[in-house]
Amino acid sequence: MQYRTDPKTGRSLSALGWGAMRAPKDPAQFTALLEQAVGAGVNFIDTAYAYSGNEVMLGQALKDTGLRDKVYIQTKCPIQFVKSGTDFEKFFSRELERLQTDRVEYYLLHMLTDAQTLQRFLSWGLDAWVQEKKAKGQIGSFGFSFHGRGADFLAILDTYPFDSCLIQYNYADPNYQAGVTGLKAAAAKGMPVMIMEPLLGGRLVNSLPPEAGQILAAAGKTPADFGLRWLWNQPEVTVVLSGMGAPEQMTANFQTADTAAVGALAETDMELYAAVRSVFAASNKIPCQGCGYCLPCPKGVNIPGCFAAYNTCYAISKKLGRHQYMTSTGSFSEKRGNAGQCAACHACEKKCPQMIPIADKLKEVGKEMEPWYWRIGMGAARVFVRFGLHK
């Protein structure tokens, strides 16, 4: 495992961190992955209050294995629930209890998207609270995770002297959200920059367009290795978080982390990234990452499922995409979650970190995925199931 230095604290952080959000829900499997990661040299683990049950599972696994002092924990304050200055302490105390620890090395404002929100928090005494926590040793570094526009990211950097930041960044679109400009701006302020969605929620591995897969295969590249090396080639990148949910995924990524280095990619490699990026961009209709922040929908629409199936139609095949759509939206059931259920209330759009115009996109998905003959067929199928005619 290679390590990179946090310029603010001097901590030596593993270049590969474990993003525990997508870890197995089974405690035994979770613990096994934790031990595998730490055994390979991973010392940075990311979780959040909003990841249902994740902090509790991590805290218990660290206690059971005795590995707490071997890792740096990064967790996040659910700012969408913060209504007053007292809420910072309320949520932080709960997180310490869940994690069964007396400190958090990296604490972030989760999904901060603009400087105006930050200014409101500061008016509620955020800075005084942070300084108190630091003085008590309960918070090591204070930062934010970002899901907004590039200009807003730069404004946030100029509003408050954060210690660290977490941004979405991958080769598919280097200018998306904070992008390369934000990466370099944060690094110029001496901040460690942590990376989320390095493989676009797995889509740069599992949902590459056939043409892109052929390009990589011809060059002897594997998708995950290809994506991670692009990030570690850049000196401004401190830790790359990977949501590794299986032992074999960890093993493969450990091998890449052992050898990837700053400036290791040649000009021919960069040309290959440009070629794959071009193909992928042409088929990526909706930039949904499947995070689920938009849920629950008042009408029960499975928004991430609808978008994933729609993208599959263009990235891989319409046949596969339509099959995925039927299964992920429960098209055969009475309580279905297909795009046609959307009432355009726009409640989901306020919570979307990618700022997708969800209602408009669901209408687009419905037009493509629910033609008149589909609606008739699904209606008949639901009657078939409801009245037990299949028995």
Image (cartoon, helix red, strand yellow):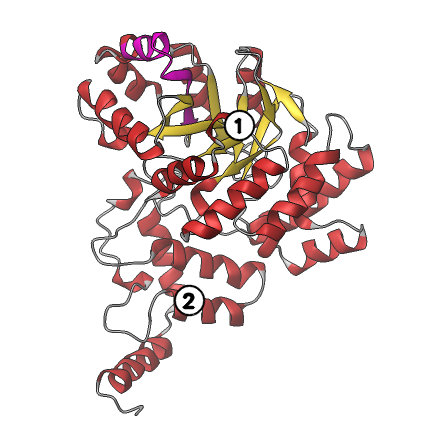
- Quadrant of the snapshot with the N terminus: top right
Q: Nearer the viewer, residue 55 or 129?
A: 55
Up-down: is 206 above or below 52?
A: below
As rendered, which of 341 and 257 lies closer to the eye?
257
Query: Where on the picture, by quarter, is residue 188?
Result: top right
Query: Do the CB atoms of the residues marked 2 and 1 lie less than 8 Å apart?
Result: no
Q: Position of residue 17 (x, y in %)?
A: 55, 34
Q: From which residue to which does the magenta span run?
A: 129-145
Q: Which residue is mark 2?
A: 325
In percent of the image, x 61 and y 49: which residue is there? 249
| Mark 2 or mark 1, whichever is nearer to me | 1
| Percent x, y of residue 332 | 32, 76
Q: Which disc, if any, is residue 70? A: 1
Question: Is 89 or 119 nearer to us in this picture?
Answer: 89
The amino acid beneath tag 2 is Tyr
Q: Quadrant location of the C terminus?
A: bottom left
Between the C-alphas of marks 2 and 1, the distance is: 43 Å
- Please state the horizontal and vertical placement of residue 171, each as a whole percent of the image: 62, 38
